[in-house]
Amino acid sequence: MKRQIIASVLGALVLFIWQFLSWAALNVHGSEQQYTPAQDEILQFLSEQNLPEGHYFLPTVPPGSSAEEEQSLMESSAGKPWARVSYHSSLDIGMGMNMIRGFVIDFVSVFLLVWILLRFETLDIKNAVMASLAVGFISYFTIPYLNSIWFEIPTLGYLIDAIVSWSLVGALLGWYLKR
């Protein structure tokens, strides 16, 4: 168990460092955080609407609408602008708890991968990297890429994350767990 925990901490550190590099230093996800010169006006307008914090898809029908009303809105909206909005009434710049939660999730993810790897009859770096990449691709395909199908969001950054971070984790785990 000690070896599994140490491997999980080391792998989580690799994931955590890559995530920092990907989002902050290398700007791999820049296409998801584009600037608009109209940002002040947009935020002021949203604030003036007394919008509850939440996630919105525009256009959509009010709750309780009939299937006919939904179909009518879909048809009348075809070819017109649409948006997804995540609205928060206050920007919290404190990152401490987010970083702790992020590391815990990285640890749990790697812990589960280590659990799988320790069940391999033959564990070497190649098997560890391939299994780790499988985890990365499954994660990418089932969340970011699936969302891109429906909501036309950019996912190249997530694909790069899946390949780079999980390859690095797999190589580390293959080396460490083989010892």
Image (spheres, rainbow, N blue to C red):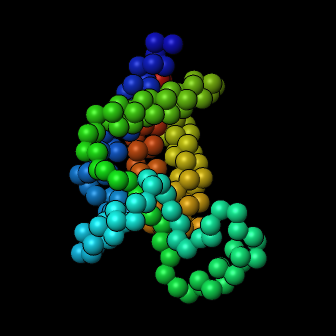
At horizontal 33% and vertical 58% (from top left) the residue drawn is 28
- Side (left or right) of 167 relative to 29: right
- Give the vertical position of 160 relative to 10 (above or below): below
Which one is nearer the viewer's eye here, 112 or 97? 97
Give residue 89's position: percent from left, percent from top.
35, 53
Q: Residue furthest top?
A: 2
- Side (left or right) of 86 relative to 28: right
Give residue 51's position: percent from left, percent from top.
43, 60
At horizontal 65% and vertical 79% (from top left) the residue drawn is 74
Report if residue 14 is visible in the image: no
- Side (left or right) of 56 relative to 168: right
- Side (left or right) of 148 relative to 23: right
Which one is nearer the viewer's eye here, 15 or 63? 63
Q: Quadrant of the C terminus?
A: top left
At horizontal 76% and vertical 76% (from top left) the residue drawn is 68
Give residue 29's position: percent from left, percent from top.
35, 59
- Give the vertical position of 90 relative to 30 (above or below): above
Residue 39: quadrant of the picture: bottom left
Report if residue 68 is visible in the image: yes
Q: For the image shown, how many numbered marks are present on the structure?
A: 0
Give residue 94's position: percent from left, percent from top.
26, 39
